[in-house]
């Protein structure tokens, strides 16, 4: 079979631990036998980020802006425990996802991959819930400080005009921790526009939630910008399509989401979206069954798995044991990136291959062949077979060969 040719490369960002192992399996078994793959490769593994003083992450982000499409493997964001596991680290490097999102200034849209044989843990959910996560600022670009003595902390801003504004954060009588977070109005506005446009494109209602009753200025700015954008630019389109834009407080939104049937986009600030996307994906089945795509204002798109590096499975793998790690989110990151590359280049063959790859995954899962994380989730009456990651990918390849 002649391989499908690519005219423009996509940016490939390799990652860490078990997902790095799966990354190579997926390329070797499901992509390279069928596609003459062209990528600009960046190793975002933790040790290589450390060797380059994290320059590789910045380079990968700017390469993504250059080529317009990227696919990213899951990566480690080190904490104190990781510093002990990797003693060669020179510092606790920031989240590579946070760095990339900051440079691209996009919005992350995450939606569950649904199977007929797996009902959501929330029984009244009948349709997917898409989380739209703001991808700039807040705690992901915050600065932290630990102090040991009594004193006071002041937040101060000095404008280019020389005008200064300051506010007392708090007086303390002993050791304390401090954090300074920020966001930019331009980024909030890009976030709002991306959410409204995505709702129009996918014909879904849009919910947005913050806590402006507490963070009256900070979260209040998010609420104001969303309302301003909606009234000025999107209200007529929403009404013409019969769509609804709905704002409420984050705690009220959580209660409403649980009682809903799904089928809408839930826009959240950066940290809220990080947490709620994991909650939604787990309730629909598994963290490994969720797509994640970062869309920048200029159309630049990055596809990734929404979950982590599966450390426990990686340690088993290092002992020579076969694992049953679910590769679906990573496969769909690749299929999404290939489809987008095909759309931008007018390469229908590449778009069709991405569709066939996803359908091959569903065909295998619908036969009951699946990784262990899904076996206990299927409905009674289904007789699933638990397989290793390697066996699962091999079954997908067999389906793909038949389809091609």
Image: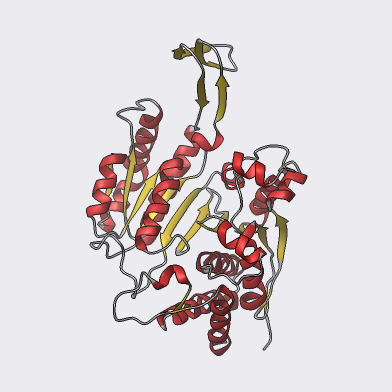
Position in image of residue 357 (x %, y %) = 53, 77
Residue for point 41% across, 60% down: 111
Instruction: From the viewer's perspective, tell me whether residue 199 is left or right of residue 86.
Output: left
Location of the C terminus (image quadrant): bottom right
Instruction: Relative to 133, say whether 356 is above or below.
Output: below
Instruction: From the viewer's perspective, tell me whether residue 144 is left or right of residue 264.
Output: right
Colouring used for the render: secondary structure
Residue for point 44% across, 49% down: 194
Position in image of residue 297 (x %, y %) = 52, 48
Q: Nearer the viewer, residue 378 or 357?
A: 378
Asked which quadrant contains residue 127, the reply is bottom left
Q: Nearer the viewer, residue 251 or 182?
A: 251
Position in image of residue 316 (x %, y %) = 61, 64
Residue for point 37% across, 40% down: 229
Asked which quadrant contains residue 41, the reply is bottom right
Instruction: Relative to 186, say whether 155 is above or below.
Output: above
Instruction: Relative to 159, say whether 184 is above or below.
Output: below
Asked which quadrant contains residue 114, the reply is bottom left
| Count of numbered badges drawn on the protein | 0
Position in image of residue 341 (x %, y %) = 60, 66
Location of the N terminus (image quadrant): bottom right
In the displayed orientation, state which residue is furthest to the front: 319
Residue for point 30% across, 60% down: 263
């Amino acid at each position: 079979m002649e391989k499908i040719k690519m005219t423009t490369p996509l940016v490939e960002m390799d990652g860490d631990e078990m997902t790095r192992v799966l990354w190579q399996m997926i390329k070797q078994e499901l992509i390279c036998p069928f596609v003459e793959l062209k990528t600009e490769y960046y190793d975002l593994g933790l040790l290589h980020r450390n060797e380059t003083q994290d320059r590789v992450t910045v380079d990968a982000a700017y390469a993504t802006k250059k080529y317009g499409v990227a696919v990213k493997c899951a990566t480690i964001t080190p904490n104190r425990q990781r510093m002990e596991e990797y003693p060669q680290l020179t510092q606790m490097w920031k989240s590579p996802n946070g760095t990339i999102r900051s440079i691209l200034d996009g919005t992350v849209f995450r939606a569950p991959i649904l199977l007929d044989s797996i009902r959501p843990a929330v029984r009244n959910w009948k349709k997917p819930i898409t989380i739209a996560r703001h991808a700039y600022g807040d705690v992901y670009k915050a600065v932290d400080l630990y102090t040991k003595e009594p004193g006071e902390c002041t937040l101060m801003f000095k404008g280019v005009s020389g005008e200064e504004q300051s506010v007392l954060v708090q007086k303390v009588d002993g050791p304390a921790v401090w954090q300074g977070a920020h966001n930019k109005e331009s980024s909030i506005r890009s976030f709002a526009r991306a959410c409204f446009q995505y709702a129009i494109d996918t014909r879904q209602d849009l919910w947005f939630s913050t806590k402006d009753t507490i963070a009256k200025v900070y979260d209040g700015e998010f609420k104001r910008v969303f309302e301003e954008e909606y009234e000025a630019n999107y209200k007529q389109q929403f009404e013409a399509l019969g769509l609804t834009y709905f704002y409420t407080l984050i705690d009220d939104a959580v209660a409403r989401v649980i009682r809903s049937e799904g089928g809408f986009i839930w826009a959240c600030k950066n940290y809220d979206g990080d947490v709620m996307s994991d909650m939604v994906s787990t309730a629909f089945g598994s963290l490994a069954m969720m797509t994640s795509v970062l869309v920048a204002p200029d159309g630049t798109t990055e596809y990734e798995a929404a979950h982590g590096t599966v450390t426990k499975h990686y340690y088993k793998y290092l002992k020579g044991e076969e694992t049953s790690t679910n590769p679906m989110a990573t496969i769909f990151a690749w299929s999404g990136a290939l489809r987008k590359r095909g759309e931008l280049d007018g390469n229908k063959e590449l778009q069709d291959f991405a569709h066939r790859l996803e359908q091959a995954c569903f065909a295998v899962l619908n036969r009951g062949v699946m990784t262990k994380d899904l076996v206990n989730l299927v409905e009674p009456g289904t007789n699933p077979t638990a397989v290793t990651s390697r066996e699962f990918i091999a079954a997908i390849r067999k389906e793909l060969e038949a389809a091609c």
